[in-house]
Amino acid sequence: MPCRRYLALWFPFLSTDRARQSRTSCRDGRPAERPFALVEKDRGALRISAIDAIALRAGLGTGMALAEARAIWPNLETEEAAPEDDARFLKRASEICEMFTPLVAIEGRDGLALDITGCVHLFGGESEMLLRARRRLRSLGLTTFGAIASTPHAARAFARYRRNTVAATGEDETLARALPIAALDQDQATTIALGRAGFRTLGDLADRPSHILSARFGEDLVARLHRILGREDIRITPLRAPPLLMAERHFPEPMTQMEHLLTVLARLMGDIANRLEARGEGGRAFELTLFRADGAVRRIGIETASGTREAASLVRLARLKMEMLADPVDPGFGFDALRLMVLRSEPLHEAQASLAEGAKPEDEARALADLVNRLVARFGRENVRRFVLRDTHDPALAGGTAAFLSASPAVAWPAPEAGQPPARPLTLFANPQPIEVLAEVPDSPPLRFRWRRMLHEVTRAEGPERIAPEWWRETLPAPATRDYYRIEDQAGHRFWIFREGLYEGRNSQPRWFLHGLFP
């Protein structure tokens, strides 16, 4: 199994780089000349939470009171800190980095970690990949340092303390031994204690027995030391789950013609189809990702009603989906890369087409699936629905609709008894309509009833079917017990009516309602 490789990216001035994007000095293209800092209120005083490179060279630092900073540099530019905006900015940077690998994780508040195993050959080597990643993030105005190593912790430490290093396989420990103790990223008290104990570099710690270090400074410090030295690899947890299958194409020059892009997509679809066939599967959920030259990332999801690996059909769905987007896909200055991923699949076995006349059930199912796929691509997933049965005795809640492409319901529709009329009507009123009923005795079926000013004489009645309230549902006020009857009048019309409540005393007054009509 090949050794895994990780690319770490560090943005030392992420907050101020983000804030400068909206400032006039950045919009008109002139370089910033004055120090810039973000401030936030801490214990009743304004303190610096982030600084830019100029402020760092001027001797300012985070945690410094704003009054003290202005005493050092009177013309300091400031702006209020916005941690939520910083998090969104970092998320956008992670989306841009998905061009290099789908396995991207956010590290803290100012870094990213990428699992680039098996991806390096697409970019001409590790050094070239690191260069392209930094150049790509420059489009966001980000100051970026990076490093590549065999563990994410080593890459992270190199990015911060041995900038833009590409450590060859097996070289992590040799390079890491020269890093300062601060590379362990421990709390201030631990870092000071290590310095007082005479430790200056990670090599000093690596030469000491692990059990002694654990007893004095804790197991977390030893574990982090081993990971930076490359002795232990704790893989990253990517923001998005890895796809089942993936095919991508990187272009030497940005591609601006959508027709050419669809031609490349057809080739990727064919590649994915061949790999699905080798697995005996068909894709149910696909994602097309387009990486634009200016850093914009567009994702287009494609779901199908059944497993498929027909490349031509998938290309048609992708084209239709792009045409129906509220925000059309704009090539702008062109796309640098195109990626197609299979997110969900199911077993699919080819069946020979019948030579006999007449459609087979599987042909009808395939035709229905093709229709659903086109409707979903045109109108959206939630707007193409199907009827489902819910596990409840309440007739008002038993039937409903769900997105056609959602998971199949666990409850199956009951099969009607042979030769028997349906027990429930197909048509139910959203709100049961009150009726006036005459019955021989309180618990008997009605003899006649009046609905919408028309009197109906009852000739046949079946029931009652008693439906008690579902006590486990928290509904207030609690619904009353219902007795349902199937009724037929002298004209042959059939109704579904119920009595709400029971005759339990002289003062009880149950009410009657018409709930549905039989065909």
Image: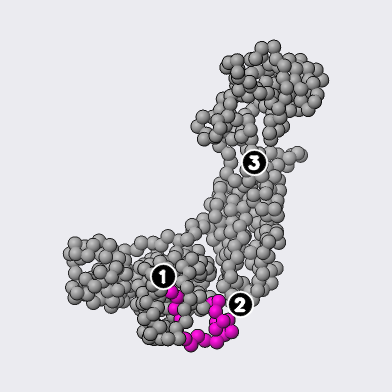
Check residue 22 for magenta coloring: yes
Percent across and percent down for residue 41 are: 41, 70
User: Callout 2: 10 Å neighbours few (<14), some, many (20+)?
Assistant: few
Residue at point 71% right, 27% down? 434
Judging depth in this view, the residue of 77 and 21 nearest the camera is 77
Give the amino acid type for the residue marked by disc 2 in the picture.
Answer: Glu
Query: What residue is drawn where x is 64% and y is 45%?
Result: 404
Mark 3 lies on a secondary structure that is: strand
Image spot of residue 222 (x, y percent): 25, 65
Q: In which quarter of the image is residue 436?
A: top right
Q: Quadrant of the N terminus?
A: bottom left
Magenta region: 21-40
Tell me: 470 left or right of 11: right
Disc 2 secondary structure class: strand
Residue at figure coordinates x 48%, y 76% from the top left? 79
Q: Quadrant of residue 108?
A: bottom left
- How many numbered marks are there? 3
Q: Which amino acid does label 1 sit on?
A: Lys
Circles 2 and 1 in contact, beta carbons < 8 Å: no
- Percent coordinates x, y for residue 295 in the rendering: 57, 72
Foreground disc of the pair 2, 1? 1
Please give the residue where the numbered disc 3 appears in the rendered image: 401
Residue 253 disc label: 2
Pinpoint residue 280: horizontal percent, then vertical percent: 55, 49
338 to 409, vertically: above or below: below
Q: Distance between the residues labelled 3 and 1?
A: 51 Å
Distance CA(mark 2)–CA(mark 1): 48 Å
Q: Name the residue under label 1.
A: 41
- Taking 134 as reference, is 503 above or below it? above
Instruction: Identify the disc placed on residue 93.
Output: none
Question: Can see residue 238?
Answer: yes
